[in-house]
Image (tube, rainbow, N blue to C red):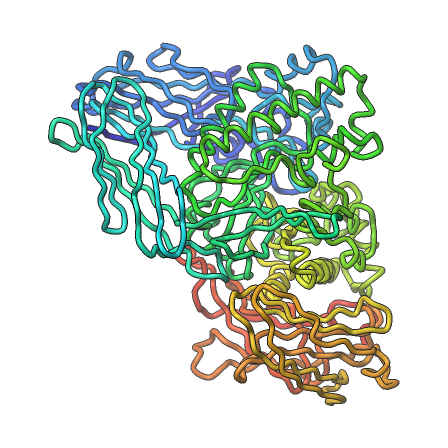
Amino acid sequence: MREISQLQEPWRFKSCDVQEWLPAKVPGCVHTDLLRNGRIADPFYGMKEHGLQWIDRKDWEYECEFHVPQDWMTMSHLELVFAGLDTYAEVYVNGKHVLSADNMFRTWKADVKELVRDGANHLRVKFRSPVLEDLPKLEKLGYALPAPNDQSELGGLGENGVSVFARKAPYHYGWDWGPRFVTSGIWREVRLEAWSGIRITDLYIRQQEISEASARLTAVLEVESDVDGDGLLQVAGDGKVRKQEVRLVRGVQTLELADLELAEPKLWWCRGLGAPNLYEFQAQLSYGGRVEAEKTVKTGLRTVRWIKKPDGDGKGTSFYLELNGVPVFAKGANHIPNDSFASEVTYERYRHEIESAARSNMNMLRVWGGGIYEEDIFYELCDEYGILVWQDFMFACSMYPGDEAFLNNVRAEAEENVKRLRNYPSIALWCGNNEMDSAWAHYNEDAGWGWKQKFTPEQRERIWTDYEAVFHRMLPQVVEELAHGMEYWPSSPITGLTGDDGQHATPSSTSGDIHYWGVWHMSEPFENYNVYIGRFMSEYGFQSFPEYKSVRAYAEEADLELESPVMLAHQKNGAGNRLIKTYMDQYMKEPKDFPSFLYMSQVLQAEAMKTAIEAHRRNMPYCMGSLYWQMNDCWPVASWASMDYYGRWKALQYYAMRSFRDVMVSVDGSKDGAVDVYVVSDLREPVEAKLRLRLFGFDGALLKETVQSDTVEGSRSVRVLSLAEKELLEGRDPASVVLLAELEQAGTSLDSKEHYFVSSKELKLAEPVIKVTEAEGSEGTRFILETDVLAKQVWLSSEVEGIFSDNFFDLIPGIPVMVAFEARTGGAAAFAPASPGKLEVRSMAEFVKHSFC
C-alpha cells in the first residue's frame, strides 16, 4: 500500500529576526515571496537587483500546518519528502528536528511516523544564509578558490567569493549574463508518502543490446520491504510480460529481471533522423498472491556511442555522437535555467523552449554546468521532440574544495541525479564540468586563465588533486556504475583525458570539443569562424539586445542609451555594450536611434552565428557538432541568447532555423576571389536536387543564371561548385548585386541563401516599398510579401505573442515570400495558427542613417 500527497496547505514565511509572518508559495523562494507580498520591487526592473543584496544575509523560515488522513496513521511508514531545499536548512515536525539539508540538488527525506498525530501537525523549515554559512569555510581554507563569475562585490563581500562552497546553482551568485540573487527556499515540491509492506522506489530499464532486429533489456528495481519471503516480480512492456520469482528481505535491496526481449523494436531517434519512439514498462511485485507494489516508466530504445578515433595522419582524433549506428551532426545550443528563480518556470515555458529548439531544426541542447539539473518535464519534452541532451554536472568556471564532507555530498548528488535521469533516451552524455580544465590547465604552465599562477606550488597541487578526485575518479565511477554504457566526458572543452599537456583544449585543437571565443571576447573578426573549427564546437557566441518591447519591460524611455546605468546593469559582460557597437561599426550601417540599435544588434548577432554555424557544417565530417551559446535567458538582459527572457525569438533563432536545416545550401565567399557553394545533408539517404544560382540586381533584374543537378550522399558536406568572383560579377558593382543559391527538389525549394560580395555596411540600398497581402483562405494567418527593390532583413512583428514561419529575411523583387504566423498558446502545443493582430513589416532601410544610395 502506498499513498502520496503533496503538501499544498497554506504556507507562510518570515525573516528569522522579525515577528511578522507573510503568505508564501511553495515551491518558491524568498525573493519571489517578498515580491508577491509587495515587500520588494520587481528584481528584474531597472537597477533593483543592486538594492536586494541584503536578502541573502538573513536567515528565513517557512511553516505550515498539515493533516494526515486517519487511515494513513495505520501504515508502517510516513515519510516527509522534500524534492528540493535551497540550500542550508533545518526541518522540524511538531517541534522535533527531523533532518538537516546542505545541497539544493538532492532530495531530502525523513520518516515522521512517530512524530505526527491526528489533527493538525506543524512543519517548520529554517534556512540559514548561504553567504554567512560559507564565509567561515573560506576563512578556514586560507585562500580564495577561483570563481570569477561570483559577483561578490555586488553582494557586498568584496573579493570573498563563496559560491564554490555551496552545492547550490552557481548562477545564483551572478554570471556574465545573469544577476546575483542568492536564493533560499523550498524550490521543489514537498510531499508526504505513506506506505506499508513493499514499495518500488526506482525502476531502471537497462539496455543491454539494442538493434533494429531486437532489444535485450534488464529491469533493475530498487525495493524497500517490511517483509522477508518469496515474491513474484513481473515486468511488462510492448505487450510482452516476463515473470520471475524473487526473494524479498527487509530493508532496501536491488532486484533484476534480465533477458526482457523485444523483437524489431521501434528505435528512438533524434529529430531529423527518425521518430522519437517511446516504450512504457510496468513492474509489479506480488507477495502472498497479491500485487503489493508497482511502478511505471517510459524510455526510448537506442544505442549512443561517442566515436573518438585517431585520424590516419596522427594529427587528431574524431569526436562525434553515433545514434543507433548512425553518425549525428549535433545542431543546437547551450541551455541555461529559464529563470533566476527556478520555481517560476512553468510547463508552458519549458514546452515553448523545447518546441522552439525542434522548430529551429536543432537536435541537441547542452544543459550547462552552472545552472541546475533540470526538472523531469524538461527531459520528457526532449524525449518527445527528439532533442538529445549533453548533460553537465553542476560545476562551472571555478575550482572547488575537496574535503571529505564536500566529496560525500557531491557523490550523493551525482548518484541521485544520474539515477533520476538514466531512463531518458535523450541523455547522450554526462560531462563533469564547464571550462574548469581549460581554465586551470594544470599540465601546461603557459595555458589557462592565469588562475594557477596565483597559488603556491603546494596549494596548486592540492587544488588539482581535489579536482581529480571529483572529475577524474568519482563522477566517471558514478556514471559507469549507474548508467549502463553512458559516456562520461571530464570537462568541456577538453581534448581527452591524457594526463599530459595534450589534455587542455585550445581554439586550434584537433581532438575533443572546443569553446571558441576569439570572436567576441578577443574582438576577432567574424571571418575567424572560418579558421577556428574543431571536431565539436560546444560553445561560441555573440551578443545582442532583446527587442524594444522586451527592453521597455525593464527600462524607462529615458534609460534607452547604450551607456545608461540601467543598460549597463542589464549587461553583465563588462564592456559588452560597447563591444556590440564596435562590431556594428565594422560590419553594419549606423542605426538612426537606440530602438534601431536594438534591431541592428540582433541582425549583427544573427550574421555572426550564421557565419559560424555554416562554417562548422561545411566542414563535416571533420567537425560534427555546433552548439552555440546560448538558447535562452534567465532574466531580461543583453546577452548571447537567441530567445529573450520572455521567449521572443530574436533574429538569431530564425537564422539558426535556416542554417540548421537538415538539407542546407551554403555559400562561402571567405576565400579571396572565390565563391564556393556547398550542399550539406544530415539525412541518412542520398539527396538528388537541382542547384540554381541566380545573380540579381537590387532592382530585381536577373543578370545571370545557372542550373546543375547534384546528388549528395547522406551525412555529407559537398562543395558542388566553385566560381571566380570576377567571372560572376563581370565588372558589375559588387555593392549593388546579390547572388541567390537555391536547392530544389521536384519543384520544391529545400533551401536558399543570399550571398553578398561586400559587407552590409557597404551595400547600396534604396528604400523599399513592401507589399503585404493576406493569403487567400488563410483566415488572417498567412501573408505574401513582395517588394519593388531589395529589402534587407525584413522584420515582421506581431501584436499577439508568437512566431513566424520565417523572419529577418531578405526580399528580392519578383520573388514573393509567404509567411505564416502561429500564436504562443499556453496549452499542450506551444504554438498554433492564429492571426497576429496588428502586423508591422519593416526592413533595415527604416533603421539606419543615410540608408539610401
Instruction: Say left or right for 551 vs 80.
Output: right
**Quadrant where the C terminus is found in the figure:** bottom right
Q: Position of residue 34 (x, y in %)?
A: 51, 31
Taking the spot 45% from the left edge, 37% from the top edge, the residue there is 484
Q: Residue furthest right?
A: 731
User: Which quadrant holds residue 173?
Assistant: top right
Instruction: Say left or right for 152 vs 414.
Output: right
Taking the spot 62% from the left edge, 35% from the top edge, the residue there is 490
> Looking at the image, is 474 positioned above or below residue 495?
above
Taking the spot 26% from the left edge, 19% from the top edge, the residue there is 120
> Looking at the image, is 181 positioned above or below residue 59?
below
Asked if one can make out residue 455 in the rendered structure from this viewpoint, the answer is yes
Taking the spot 33% from the left edge, 26% from the top edge, the residue there is 254
Q: Nearer the viewer, residue 615 or 650?
A: 615
User: Which quadrant holds residue 847?
Assistant: bottom right
**Quadrant where the N terminus is found in the figure:** top left
Q: Position of residue 372 (x, y in %)?
A: 54, 36
Q: Nearer the viewer, residue 507 or 631?
A: 507
Q: Position of residue 355 (x, y in %)?
A: 48, 56
